[in-house]
Image: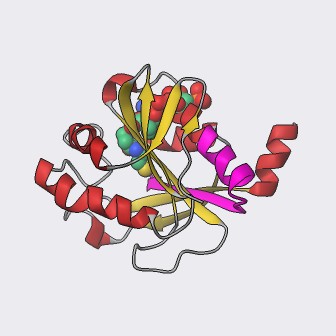
Amino acid sequence: MPQAILRSERVHLIPLSDEHIDHQVELDADPEVMRYLGGVRTREQVVDTAHRAALTDARRAEGLGYWAGFVDGDFAGYWILRPPGDTDEEPPEGQAELGYRLLRRYWRQGLGSEASAELIRHGFEDLGLERICAMTSAANTASRATMAAVGLRHVRDFDADASWFPPGTDLSSVEYAITRQQWSQDRAA
Ligand SMILES: CC(C)(COP(=O)(O)OP(=O)(O)OC[C@H]1O[C@@H](n2cnc3c(N)ncnc32)[C@H](O)[C@@H]1OP(=O)(O)O)[C@@H](O)C(=O)NCCC(=O)NCCS
């Protein structure tokens, strides 16, 4: 199944493609957006590495990947429902990892959680996933609050792989997750 076009109440989610590169460059150039994501990226780093890696990652599992999100026709950020693990690994069956990154002017309007909830619904209902997780820096309050807002539970603390981050980065990280059963029970409650 190819990646679906999705819609939450306010966000139109379109599978990430080359036509979204300029938006990705703007997003990854903001130090506040990239504070817990290894720091800002230049246009070259986005075009040659991050964008390519996102598209390659999306090809590892049917239906999963990266989505560019638009609000009233304007790019607001991107949302991720990717196969967990490294890009050269065989992804675990029935699982996905949630992520999100919004332009600063769209923060604190409920958009991060709104479109994430739609991706989670899509994952469980349309793709038949069994478990969705999300990981972030332990200090990333906004990301943790967004995970909790869409029903994910804290499952573990761990240290992130140092090779992903600039020297001196605090590697303390957290994983949150929700199973299909928990999601169904939450919806019924
Ligand atoms: C994380 C991020 C996507 C949140 O998006 P958002 O649209 O502002 O989040 P929402 O408005 O949907 O808020 C969701 C919940 O988080 C809370 N929240 C959001 N930002 C917060 C902050 N800075 N501090 C505390 N709580 C915060 C909201 O109050 C809400 O909680 P509630 O449902 O209990 O009221 C956004 O801050 C961002 O793009 N950050 C930079 C990129 C990043 O760090 N991504 C995560 C990497 S793992």
Residue 41 place in picture, x, y as percent: 18, 50
- The front one of 3 and 137 is 3
Which residue shows up at 44% across the image and 19% down it?
Answer: 72
| Magenta stretch: includes residue 125 | yes
The magenta region covers 118-138
Which residue shows up at 81% across the image and 39% down it?
Answer: 187
Residue 38 place in picture, x, y as percent: 26, 55
156 horizontally vs 52: left or right: right
| Magenta stretch: includes residue 136 | yes
144 horizontally vs 160: left or right: right
Q: Quadrant of residue 121?
A: top right
Q: In which quarter of the image is residue 164?
A: bottom left
Which residue shows up at 42% across the image and 74% down it?
Answer: 86
Residue 90 place in picture, x, y as percent: 51, 80
Location of the N terminus by quadrant is bottom right
Location of the C terminus by quadrant is top right
